[in-house]
Amino acid sequence: MHWGRSLVPMRIHRLAEGVIRQIAAGEVVERPASVAKELVENALDAGAGRVEVEVRGGGIGGLTVRDDGCGMDPEEMRLAVERHTTSKLREEADLQHVRTLGFRGEALAALCAVARVVLTSRPSGRAEGSLLRLEGGNLTEERPAAHAVGTTVAMEELFFNVPARRAFLLTPTAEARHTLAVLRRLALGHPHVGFFVRSEGREVLVAPPAADRRTRAAQVYGRALADALVEVELETEGAHLWGLFGPPETVRPTRGDQILFVKGRPVRLGPLTRPLYAAYERYLPRGRHPVCLLYLNLDPAAVDANVHPRKEEGRFRAQAAVGDLVHSAAVRALGELPAPAPEAGGRPRAVWPQRVAAPSFAGATPMLRFPHHESGDRPWRFLGQTSRGYAILETEDGLEFLDPHAAHERVLFERYAGSEVPTQSLLIPVEIDVSFDRAAALERALPRLARLGIVLEPFGRASFRLTGWPAPLSDRQAKLGYQGPVLALADELLDGEPPNEELWRRVACAAALKAGERLTDRELLALIDAWKACREPARCPHGRPVVVPLNWSELERRLGR
């Protein structure tokens, strides 16, 4: 069969209007989350002080957004569902000075092209509202309707007429998670607006108007994390940055909690990721990411939010200066350096994180030598520890450099994985605040967590009381604190329903020795003995190597012997 060029000549023709609408919709409406984003941005631009969102079937089945903004009269409503209509731009020059969130005129029209939509609205000064019903972009009903001042957009059956697009959507649970993430970002960017979100009839975000950004962060993430965030404010000529930075102990498994707000619009950090990580690099465990909420105000002409079809990225005209500002703020938050003095012209000096000074070995305790041990499959001898906490072992084949954190993880994981773990009751229960979606994930998993020795009791809409912890880990965890490991478990549960083995892997990681943590030589010997007895000692439960060998032949080759 010939798979190359078609044998039938292709003739140029005009697309049908319905096809044009569906293609345009694809640029704006990717999934339920993008529907929520466009509709809520329009509500905010309309001056809403309260936004309510209802999600049904993950947003695939339906999504409703209500606001108390300025509303629309019947003529404006008819224009709003046409392509290339907007209240936010007048002329070409306005594209260079965008001060609103959603100005893409085809957003509502695009949604109407791929869903069944009911639009109801009433402006102030009118006694009665109006209703439009559309299906696949076609107006099927128009009539007066009772409605408070503001607008309601009710969407049903997203992509009902584009089955190929609908087939690529994720499960309702996953789509609901994406939608909530978008709504969280918008809520964080507009603390003065009340956000109330329900999913499948359950409250997943309750955020009344907040007095300040930290209060809003507490409504979204929980009080414990919000209180831990470090506030930094820096200003240069033409730019002002106010940020909340998470200390190293609040790191996350993903970058989802790194958000940049430019004049209230949430965008991805993009190229600003590099200066942020340059400040955090020596604090971050592998695979972990810092938390930060950055609020940047600058001349709208200095940023172009339209480099991305859905306005999710921004390009700055003074990219290096903005990067320096972000880096300086992160360094200041971490407490490494004082706030940098600006250079002439207002640009902050580029300040890079100080490296840890090389340790001095003068007067150090000589490395201890111990007799051969027979644990494991062959003899070995412990030679000592490096200044960075790695253990050095000598075997018949050469040297081994062992990571005690990874070894401890493997020991803890194998000791109790697959079995019910005894619980140590806490003398004083610990109250833990989490975000609404994490609360829902934890509540669903309470029986499974109890089998791992973790006893949590719901205590309010997004809070829990921790009353028990795995007995083998309780003494150590009491010193380290419980907030971090519980949040890590919640993050794991957000991504689905991992097996108990995966949850125990997370618990073992949280309770294990930390990178660089020092043990006495005899404590380290006991750990090595336990690790050598493991069934799979080569790697930690996450798959990282526990030990790096350097055999004698390789050493001699490098030394030229």
Image (spheres, helix red, strand yellow):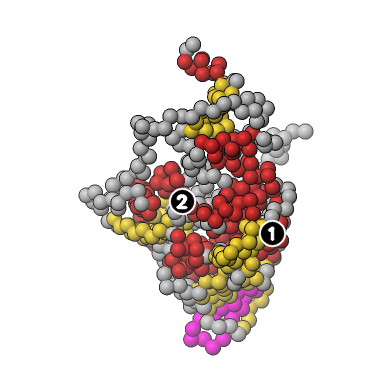
Q: Residue furthest bottom?
A: 127
Which amino acid lies under the numbered mark 1 shown in the image of this protein? Ala
x then y, percent, for residue 525: 56, 35
The residue under the point 52% across, 45% down is 514
Q: Which residues are magenta?
A: 114-133
SS class, disc 1: helix
Q: Residue furthest top?
A: 561
* Residue annotated with mark 1: 450
Q: Is residue 532 visible?
A: yes
Q: Residue furthest front?
A: 371
Q: Splitting the image into 4 quarters, where does residue 494 fall? A: bottom right
x then y, percent, for residue 34: 57, 60
x then y, percent, for residue 337: 32, 49
Q: Is residue 393 above or below residue 234?
A: above
SS class, disc 2: helix
Which amino acid lies under the numbered mark 2 shown in the image of this protein? Pro
- 293 horizontally vs 73: left or right: left
Real-space CA distance between mark 1 and mark 2, rounded to the nearest whole angstrom: 28 Å
Q: Considering the image in quadrants, where does the N terminus appear? A: top right
Residue nearest the viewer, comparing 440 with 124: 440
The residue under the point 58% across, 57% down is 486
- 132 horizontally vs 7: left or right: left
Q: Nearer the viewer, mark 1 or mark 2?
A: 1
Count residues near mark 2 (Cα–Cα under 10 Å), then give few for <14, some for 14-19, many for 20+.
some
* Residue annotated with mark 2: 248
Q: Is residue 302 above or below residue 131?
A: above
Q: Is residue 111 visible?
A: no
Query: Does the magenta run of residues contain 81?
Result: no
The residue under the point 64% across, 47% down is 505
The residue under the point 56% across, 65% down is 428
What type of secondary structure mainly makes up the magenta span? strand
Of the numbered discs 1 and 2, the one sitting upstream in the chain is 2
